[in-house]
């Protein structure tokens, strides 16, 4: 053991501090010991990587208390998304509009008419209010909300296709992150997958030949995270809907992200909207609440009334239902879509609407305040940001990032320290720089980003 390592206190000395010991009753002795070991391990790693003296005892206690306070608050830590991916699943997908946040807190603290008809004084429907909004914004006849889009697909398959056949194009047998694979979901739902077409080309005739008396559904899946380019042919939603209607087989589309806005206005081509898909004649359309809709985690199903009625009658729905907070936030978000001029009240759309000059100005403000005060080189660079969350996998958004090159220590260490700051700051490393992308920043993140860099680089 080197002499600097010898300067570190023993675990039992940290645990003897009264402020630390007070956490024993809340978290248990095991959690305390584990947290103290982690703080000391982190300190050892820092000394090994960067050299220098061990931090003062009081600072180690401070770090340990921060860690314990986090554990006590169940561990979710607010983060600044400087990764340049708007709908970042690992960072909690879409941030909510202020209206949705207000609605959640208004409903959360008390009772509400969740399942109560105030006029008649009898039991009411939990979904009625949000369904009316969903029909209005999508143009569909009826709607249903479940826990997430994976649950929506599961409910559709269970209701219509258990023990029967589902026809899907080979090119659309997608695996979304987190192990959600269309072929596996079909099998798990007791359906038989009938693949049609080749990887690159599928025609209406391929679907037609696959139809039998056992066909329960024709399923289209949004290829959320890949593109098949080159020599290709795909059957459109309209063509498939026409075939389904001729054959008397319902057509379902899993849209994945499911935007209600034509993204061409933001320079992003080729993402079909929910309204277009409904208008094309698809019988049921499923999509997520927390991707490009910009709402809470939820799965939305919109479509034809008799089919939605069958979904509603499935006992499985009880296990997939959403709570009052989700419904409150979803309704508040959808109300913004009813007034199109208000769209940018949804954070994702405010981020999409920003020009690169605005992004540059945001970062320049931080750069000018930090320059000369931190031990790092700062410059603004052009980057490409992504929408993420299962939409437009190959489309990029022009963006700008603050590139930070520490004069002492390396980019990995700086990136780790920014992640350990509270709120956490998540950027990405390119060569010897940490890139902090402006595209997914909210206005209120700018001060946090400044403070995180100032404190992280002060002692570097
Ligand atoms: C994201 C996605 C899902 C899963 O949606 P969740 O809301 O995360 O359950 C399903 N299908 C497609 C095509 C997707 O992009």
Image (tube, rainbow, N blue to C red):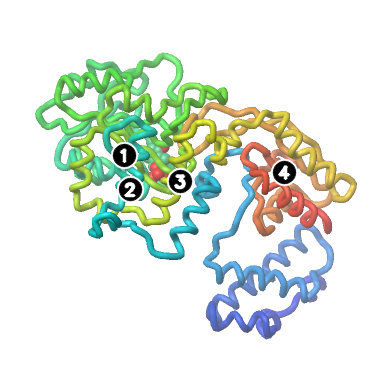
Please report the residue visible at 68 percent of the width from the left and 42 percent of the height from the top. Answer: 429
Question: Which residue, given by chain and number where applicable, does mark 3 sit on?
Answer: 332
Q: In this rendering, which labeled residue sits more in front, label 3 or label 4?
A: 3
| CB of mark 1 near ligand 1 (< 8 Å) | no
Q: Position of residue 156 (x, y in %)?
A: 25, 41
Front residue of 301/50: it is: 301
Q: Is residue 197 visible?
A: yes
How many callouts does the rendering have?
Answer: 4
Front residue of 452/377: it is: 452
Q: Position of residue 348 (x, y in %)?
A: 55, 38
Question: Which residue, given by chain and number where applicable, does mark 2 sit on?
Answer: 146
- Contact, mark 4 vs mark 1 (Cβ under 8 Å): no
Label 4 residue SS: strand
Please report the residue visible at 15 percent of the width from the left and 30 percent of the height from the top. Answer: 215
Q: Label 4 to label 2, Cα distance in Å?
A: 39 Å
Q: Label 2 to label 1, Cα distance in Å?
A: 8 Å
Front residue of 47/137: it is: 137
Question: Which residue, given by chain and number where applicable, does mark 4 sit on?
Answer: 434
Question: In which quadrant of the rendered image does the N terminus lie?
Answer: bottom right
Q: Label 4 to label 1, Cα distance in Å?
A: 41 Å
Q: Left or right of 345: which side holds 57?
A: right
Q: In this rendering, which labeled residue sits more in front, label 4 or label 1?
A: 1
Q: Label 3 to label 1, Cα distance in Å?
A: 18 Å
Question: Which comes before the other along the chain, label 4 or label 1?
Answer: 1
Question: Which comes before the other along the chain, label 2 or label 3?
Answer: 2
- Contact, mark 2 vs mark 1 (Cβ under 8 Å): yes
Question: Which residue, given by chain and number where applicable, does mark 1 sit on?
Answer: 301
């Amino acid at each position: 053991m080197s002499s600097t390592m010898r300067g570190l206190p023993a675990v039992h000395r940290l645990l003897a501090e009264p402020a630390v010991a007070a956490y024993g009753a809340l978290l248990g002795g095991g959690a305390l010991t584990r947290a103290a070991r982690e703080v000391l391990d982190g300190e050892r790693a820092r000394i090994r990587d960067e050299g220098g003296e061990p931090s003062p005892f009081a600072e180690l206690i401070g770090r340990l208390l921060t860690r314990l306070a986090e554990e006590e608050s169940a561990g979710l830590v607010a983060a600044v998304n400087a990764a340049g991916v708007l709908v970042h699943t690992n960072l909690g997908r879409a941030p909510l509009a202020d209206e949705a946040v207000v609605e959640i807190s208004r409903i959360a603290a008390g009772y509400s008419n969740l399942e109560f008809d105030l006029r008649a004084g009898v039991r009411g429907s939990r979904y009625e209010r949000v369904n009316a909004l969903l029909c209005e914004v999508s143009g569909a006849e009826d709607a249903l909300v479940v826990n997430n889009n994976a649950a929506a697909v599961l409910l559709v398959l269970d209701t219509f296709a258990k023990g029967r056949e589902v026809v899907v194009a080979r090119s659309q047998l997608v695996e979304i992150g987190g192990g959600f694979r269309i072929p596996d979901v079909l099998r798990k739902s007791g359906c038989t997958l009938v693949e049609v077409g080749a990887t690159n080309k599928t025609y209406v005739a391929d679907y037609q030949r696959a139809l039998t008396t056992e066909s329960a559904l024709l399923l289209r899946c949004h290829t959320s995270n890949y593109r098949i380019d080159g020599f290709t042919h795909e059957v459109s939603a309209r063509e498939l809907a026409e075939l389904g209607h001729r054959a008397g087989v319902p057509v379902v589309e899993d849209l994945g992200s499911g935007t209600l806005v034509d993204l061409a206005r933001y320079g992003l081509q080729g993402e079909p909207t929910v309204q277009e898909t409904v208008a094309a004649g698809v019988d049921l359309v499923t999509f997520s609440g927390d991707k490009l809709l910009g709402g809470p985690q939820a799965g939305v199903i919109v479509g034809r009334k008799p089919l939605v009625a069958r979904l509603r009658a499935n006992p499985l729905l009880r296990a997939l239902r959403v709570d009052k907070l989700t419904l409150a936030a979803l309704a508040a978000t959808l109300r913004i879509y009813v007034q199109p001029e208000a769209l940018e009240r949804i954070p994702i759309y405010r981020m999409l609407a920003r020009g690169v000059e605005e992004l540059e100005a945001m970062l320049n403000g931080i750069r000018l305040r930090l320059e000369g005060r931190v031990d790092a080189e700062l410059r603004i660079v052009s980057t490409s940001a992504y929408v993420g969350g299962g939409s437009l996998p190959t489309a990029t958004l022009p963006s700008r990032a603050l590139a930070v090159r520490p004069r002492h220590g390396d980019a990995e260490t700086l990136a780790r320290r920014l992640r350990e700051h509270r709120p956490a700051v998540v950027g990405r490393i390119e060569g010897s720089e940490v890139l902090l992308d402006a595209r997914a920043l909210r206005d209120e993140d700018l001060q946090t980003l400044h403070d995180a860099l100032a404190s992280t680089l002060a002692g570097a």
